[in-house]
Image: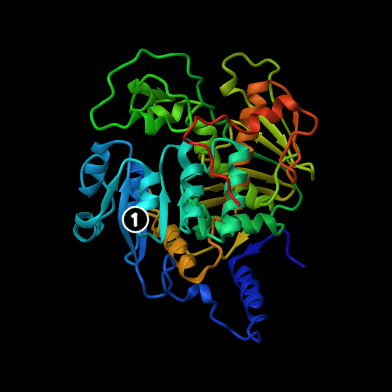
Amino acid sequence: MIDRTRFSRRALLGRMAATAGSAVAIPYLIPSEILSAQGRPGANDRVQIGVIGAGLRGKYLISNVPDEGRVAAICDFSNDRIAATLKLDSSGKHAFPPNRFRERDAARCATYQDYRRLIDEVALDAVMIATPDHHHILAAMLACQAGLDIYVEKPLSVAIAEGRALVNAVGRHRRVCQVGSQQRSMEMNRFACQAVREGLLGKISHVQVLNYPGPMRYEGLPEEPVPEGHAWDLFCGPTPLRPYNRKLWVKDVFKIDGRSWRGWDLWRSYSGHLMTNHGAHGLDQVQWALGMDHTGPVEIWPLTEDYQGEMRFCPVVARYANGIELRFDASTGVSGVGGLVHGEHGRMAIMRNGFRADPADLVTDPPDPAAAEVWQGVGIVARPHIQNWLDCIKTRGTPNAPIEVGHRSVTVCHLAGIARELGRKLRWDPAKEIFPDDAEANALRDRPRRAGFELPVDV
């Protein structure tokens, strides 16, 4: 029986070793998928990667691709961003980790503005998707149908139904899909979440996460000239083709709580703002720690009593079937990419690349602090998470942040947004992914798509 008042890294590693040891008698056969074939790299081949989205995040991904990956093509709606990506710099205001892309791959890297052409025309093994959020699913589904493996940034989707469509496509086409929730590859987070799941805190009562603000609705902005080399129609993609305005696109236009955000990140058509941006990280850790990776809450409601202000800032509470409450609460004391778990024996704060137990002696023999150093450096380092993805491409294994997990995590964020939008309590069936007997809420599970950018029929 697990000691429910102490949790040791040594004990955890022992259980992992015992599990691995139980399989040693099974004959080891090399799956045919590991052998090299067209569109499927062998163990010693460089994985040919197309990067879709060359903004700040896309550049970080490119600069963190390990040596066994080759960036063979890049795509962005802005020619200026494509040009800047080909000259990745390791100095200045937006520095990137030192990398070999500029010297090794940039000169022979194909460039596109339309990712549909990139997927059709370039011989690739995989794609990395770092577009604005409203393009994630379409780009990933087209990649699935082309037989490519996928790394897709979080938040996975802008609507619940499109996320499920991608989960189904990944399974049907047997693709390796890693969601960009890097904390799933961090030993500190893995240890903390498993400790909670295995009884460190005893019975869990509730979890707090930040009260992430939601997006703004488009209310009409004056038309401005489209910058030269900027494919505005492609940027709008499945959303309405609105007149160009820099506030829909350019970073550093708005400030919220003293922080600057890219323009598209603030608008409901393109993103869920911080509810899905940071929330996809924070809720992912909550789902993991509670053992809810393949399910979700059964009720969710906005705290409208005594609340005054925009509903996108309204606090929200969700409840799981086992009675645990999830509270979107500004007083967590942890960052927006984690949560604070409350149990009968104490509390566990889980944040990026770290954790804090209260009382501290709940945890004995924690992971070596050196395990956190791999994630430290210039920028937001994603290299170990990408490495895990590349390894799985070659072995056809399951990556650390698989598609079902990414979908379930951001679904909790979408539920909070829908509860705010309707301003009332909702029941949710996580198995069927519907709101039972609630046509108004079910209509918000998906969004209409502009002609020419429909999701492909996947058979």
Tell me: residue 259, above or below residue 32.
Answer: above
The answer to which of 207 and 356 lies nearer the viewer is 207
The answer to which of 290 and 458 lies nearer the viewer is 458
Q: Position of residue 434 (x, y in %)?
A: 73, 37
Residue linked to disc 1: 122
Q: Position of residue 275 (x, y in %)?
A: 54, 33
Tell me: residue 382, above or below residue 161.
Answer: below
The answer to which of 399 and 444 lies nearer the viewer is 444
339 relative position to 230: left or right: right
197 relative position to 132: left or right: right
Residue 349 visible in the displayed image: no
Q: Position of residue 362 (x, y in %)?
A: 64, 56
* Quadrant hosting residue 445: top right
Name the residue at 71% across, 35% down: 318
Q: Amino acid at mark 1?
A: Val
Q: How is the image coloured?
A: rainbow
Residue 164 visible in the displayed image: yes
Name the quadrant of the N terminus: bottom right
Mark 1 crowd level (few <14, some 14–19, many ≥20, 10 Å Cα) = some
173 relative position to 2: left or right: left
Q: Secondary structure at mark 1?
A: loop
* Quadrant hosting residue 14: bottom right
Q: How many marks?
A: 1
Name the residue at 35% across, 59% down: 123
Name the residue at 38% across, 48% down: 380
* Quadrant hosting residue 83: top left
Q: Position of residue 128 (x, y in %)?
A: 41, 52
